[in-house]
């Protein structure tokens, strides 16, 4: 997967990358609605997934304001669907909440990952994003196994520990430092480390967010597409929140 990601970033066009992100969003949305809205099936499910995709579809144009317009369009269609089928929904408010959150949490966040690819040095920044998140996860795993005693959020994710989070932060910073050696001068070293620390913290929050959803609906994994590693949503949960954070760090010239 790492090799495929590298080839996609550095040898594929921004449009190809966008198409892969959209495909991932379709799968992630399907897993999300399977978990949160089991009664949503058939044509209504496919229609809901489609209009929830509007923000990430709008990312094709590489402009954040068009992505925001896509989000508003998604909200308007969700309201229209709820009004049209009001008498047939078991809980129309739940439908609006689930579909609205899906548009933001999955589609809007994944749209920002695609937007990064359109930026100057986009492939490097996406490599940094994935490397920091993956490095943090790896560091958290081994630090947690070796030193983990105090739980971070035991009611949400019993395996996450304070020591694991500290280990993840150190590993994420180290990963950013190593990447900076291969791409010198891309950003101020100390600002890069500060950004990496922020990405690690937000990545942990993203992981806990998906765990909170799964815990609330009583499922272990979002899906089975990755053969023993859960669903796609289980793999990208940290990227969903970190993608927009990195995009705006770049957009506002902080990095």
Image: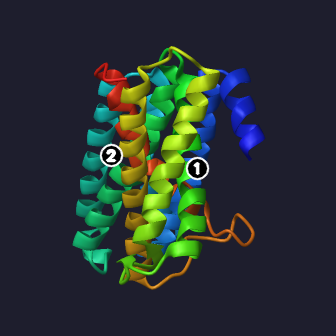
Placement of 129 over or under 205, stated as above or below: above
- Residue position marked by numbered label 1 in the rendering: 135
> Based on the displayed image, in which of its 4 quarters is residue 61 positioned?
top left
The residue at the point 58 percent across, 50 percent down is 135
In this view of the protein, can residue 51 be seen by the observer?
Answer: no
- Residue position marked by numbered label 2 in the rendering: 74
Q: Position of residue 24 (x, y in %)?
A: 59, 48
Placement of 240 over or under 121, stated as above or below: below
Residues at marks 1 and 2, CA–CA distance in whole angstroms: 34 Å
Nearer to me, 226 or 84? 226
Q: Position of residue 164 (x, y in %)?
A: 48, 66
Q: Nearer the viewer's eye, disc 1 or disc 2?
A: 1
Q: Is residue 242 left or right of residue 69?
A: right
Disc 2 crowd, CA 10 A, few/some/many (<14, 14-19, 20+): many
Quarter of the image with the C terminus is: top left
Choose the circle earlier in sequence order: 1 or 2: 2
Nearer to me, 251 or 69? 251
Disc 1 crowd, CA 10 A, few/some/many (<14, 14-19, 20+): many
Q: How many marks?
A: 2
Query: What's the coloring here?
Result: rainbow
The residue at the point 23 percent across, 61 percent down is 83
> Based on the displayed image, in which of its 4 quarters is residue 166 positioned?
bottom left
Nearer to me, 75 or 86? 75
Q: Is residue 14 left or right of residue 244?
A: right
């Amino acid at each position: 997967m790492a090799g495929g990601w590298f080839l996609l970033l550095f040898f594929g066009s921004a449009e190809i990358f966008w198409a892969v992100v959209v495909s991932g969003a379709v799968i992630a949305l399907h897993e999300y609605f399977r978990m949160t809205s089991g009664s949503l099936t058939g044509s209504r499910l496919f229609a809901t997934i489609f209009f929830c995709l509007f923000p990430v579809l709008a990312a094709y144009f590489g402009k954040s304001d068009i992505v925001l317009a896509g989000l508003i369009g998604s909200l308007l269609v969700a309201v229209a669907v709820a009004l049209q089928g009001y008498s047939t929904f078991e809980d129309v408010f739940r439908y609006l909440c689930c579909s609205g959150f899906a548009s933001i949490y999955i589609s809007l966040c994944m749209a920002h990952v695609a937007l990064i690819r359109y930026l100057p040095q986009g492939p490097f920044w996406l490599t940094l994003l994935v490397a920091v998140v993956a490095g943090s996860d790896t560091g958290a795993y081994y630090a947690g196994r070796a030193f983990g005693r105090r739980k971070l959020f035991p009611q949400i994710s019993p395996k996450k520990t304070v020591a694991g989070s500290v280990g993840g932060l150190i590993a994420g910073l180290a990963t950013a430092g190593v990447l900076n050696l291969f791409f010198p001068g891309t950003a101020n070293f100390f600002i890069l480390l500060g950004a990496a620390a922020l990405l690690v913290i937000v990545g942990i929050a993203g992981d806990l967010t998906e765990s909170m959803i799964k815990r609330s609906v009583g499922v272990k994994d979002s899906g089975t597409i990755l053969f023993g590693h859960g669903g796609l949503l289980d793999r990208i949960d940290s990227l969903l929140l970190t993608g927009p954070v990195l995009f705006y760090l770049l957009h506002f010239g902080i990095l």
